[in-house]
Image: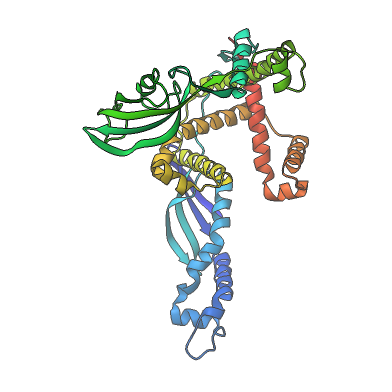
């Protein structure tokens, strides 16, 4: 098996000619015969007893050619690709086989899509904004307000009308042109006024009305609403059964001890929140800085990316989402039906993300090559042990399940990211 020729015929496209010598192909036909002989019937022979020569005489010399080709094809093509020094990113295409027989062997022509040539701009010293990492007084106040909200209670109001911020338990029924419409009716519905649950203008008109009061709410459906109601005027017949007011706990030492058993005072809680918020902001700032640096690098990069690479990445993203849905007890097709989406629509939502991720990986691979970034055996072993601990498996099981070259590639990618981030300038 050998590479006969290799020629670049287009951007990221090569045509190669591969040969399989006669002896190798002849041996492959014998292997195919031995594999299939028990299923072949030849007149005058018991099933499975006919010789290879007799079968070829009855069914033709090429009786085992197709199966023999399947046997030699993978190694022949891979050997030719290795000999040509090509980095292939998809399956061969435009395959033709001008010669295939036991006397001459096999000659194949095919085209290959190769890894694109990447030309980087400046990738060391890239400047990007690094966000604020210190928790502000406003950040702490907002966190405390959220904690108050989570620990609030609803108190029934009997001496006043509903106000924005209250929760009103209402009956409602909607009419367009005097006719009730589907989905426009509800009973004893708890509506928090100001939450934006209902269409614009509805909740504001409930405010000001009292328990047992019956009243009309007049609204216009938004233009982007469901087609049968978009832009139409509607009247909702409403009645309030109960009004509840949200009562927030006082911000004091008792509140602090109630929400966090590790503190004794409100000041201690504020200090703890300041530390936690600052840690979150530091993590967010680092992530955003990293993304901004990579964004600038790929914006300054030149590469004609084969569409198959984008499609492969898109497949990975869709599979990841399908797996996450499965972990929640929902399969992807059911989710798409629920969302009213087709698979094409779903894939389209991730198209830009896939293209961006491919560009980022291309840039990082090129940076790793230019900077001679590699994964050491110690780093690979450390990663294997980390995965083994994470999944409660033995290291050898991880090595059997995950190719070491994949682990090595992940390490190199992370080191390349660290390299450009460490070299970047914070604005």
**Is any atom of residue 335 visible in this view?**
yes
Q: Quadrant of the C terminus?
A: top right
Q: How is the image coloured?
A: rainbow
Q: Quadrant of the N terminus?
A: bottom right
Residue 305 in the image: state x and y as whole percent.
Answer: 46, 34
Q: Relative to the observer, which residue lies in front, 202 or 96?
A: 202
Q: Residue at x 60, y 9 (%)?
A: 138
| Outermost bottom residue | 44
Left or right, 358 with reference to 124: left
> Residue at position x 51%, y 29% from top?
118
Q: Nearer the viewer, residue 103 or 31?
A: 31
Q: Is residue 21 visible?
A: no
Q: Where does residue 394 sit, x and y in percent of width and height?
A: 77, 48
Q: Position of residue 272 (x, y in %)?
A: 72, 16
Left or right? Give the position of 173 relative to 400: left
Callout count: 0
Q: In the depicted view, which residue is nearer to us: 219 or 101?
A: 219
The extreme left residue here reads: 177
**Quick check: 157 above or below 18?**
above
Report the side of 287 relative to 231 (left or right): right
Image vertical order of residue 140 relative to residue 65, above or below: above
Q: Is residue 306 above or below residue 286?
A: below
Rendered image quadrant of residue 150:
top right
Residue placed at 57% from the left, 44% from the top? 328
Task: Indicate the position of residue 413 as horizontal and vertical percent values.
Answer: 63, 31
């Amino acid at each position: 098996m050998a590479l006969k020729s290799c020629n670049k015929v287009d951007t990221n496209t090569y045509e190669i000619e591969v040969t399989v010598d006669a002896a190798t192909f002849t041996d492959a036909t014998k292997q195919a015969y031995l594999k299939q002989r028990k299923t072949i019937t030849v007149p005058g022979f018991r099933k499975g007893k006919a010789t290879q020569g007799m079968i070829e005489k009855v069914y033709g010399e090429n009786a085992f050619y197709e199966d023999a080709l399947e046997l030699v094809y993978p190694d022949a093509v891979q050997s030719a690709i290795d000999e040509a020094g090509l980095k292939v990113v998809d399956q061969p295409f435009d395959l033709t086989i001008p010669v295939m027989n036991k006397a001459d062997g096999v000659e194949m022509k095919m085209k290959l899509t190769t890894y694109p040539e990447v030309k980087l701009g400046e990738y060391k010293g890239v400047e990007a904004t690094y966000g604020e990492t210190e928790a502000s007084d406003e950040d702490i106040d907002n966190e405390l307000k959220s904690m108050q909200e989570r620990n609030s209670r609803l108190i029934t109001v009997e001496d006043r009308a509903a106000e924005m911020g209250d929760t009103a338990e209402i009956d409602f029924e909607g009419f367009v042109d005097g006719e009730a419409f589907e989905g426009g009716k509800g009973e004893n519905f708890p509506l928090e006024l100001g939450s934006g649950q209902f269409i614009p203008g509805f909740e504001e008109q409930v405010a000001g009305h009292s328990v047992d009061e019956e009243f009309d709410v007049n609204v216009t459906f938004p233009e982007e609403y469901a087609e049968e109601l978009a832009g139409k005027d509607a009247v909702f017949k409403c009645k309030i059964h109960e009004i509840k007011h949200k009562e927030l706990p006082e911000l004091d030492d008792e509140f602090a001890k109630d929400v966090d058993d590790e503190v004794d005072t409100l000041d201690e809680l504020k200090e703890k929140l300041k530390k936690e918020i600052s840690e979150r902001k530091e993590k967010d700032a680092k992530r955003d800085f990293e993304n901004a640096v990579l964004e600038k690098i790929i914006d300054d990069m030149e590469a004609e990316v084969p569409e198959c690479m984008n499609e492969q990445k898109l497949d990975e993203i869709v599979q990841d989402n399908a797996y996450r849905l499965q972990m929640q007890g929902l399969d992807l097709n059911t989710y798409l039906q629920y969302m009213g989406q087709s698979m094409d629509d779903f894939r389209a939502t991730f198209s830009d993300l896939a293209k961006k991720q491919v560009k980022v990986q291309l840039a990082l691979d090129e940076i790793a090559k230019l900077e001679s970034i590699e994964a050491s055996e110690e780093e690979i072993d450390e990663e294997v042990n980390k995965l083994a601990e994470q999944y409660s498996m033995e290291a050898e099981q991880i090595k059997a399940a995950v190719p070491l070259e994949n682990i090595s590639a992940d390490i190199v990618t992370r080191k390349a990211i660290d390299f450009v981030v460490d070299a970047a300038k914070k604005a």
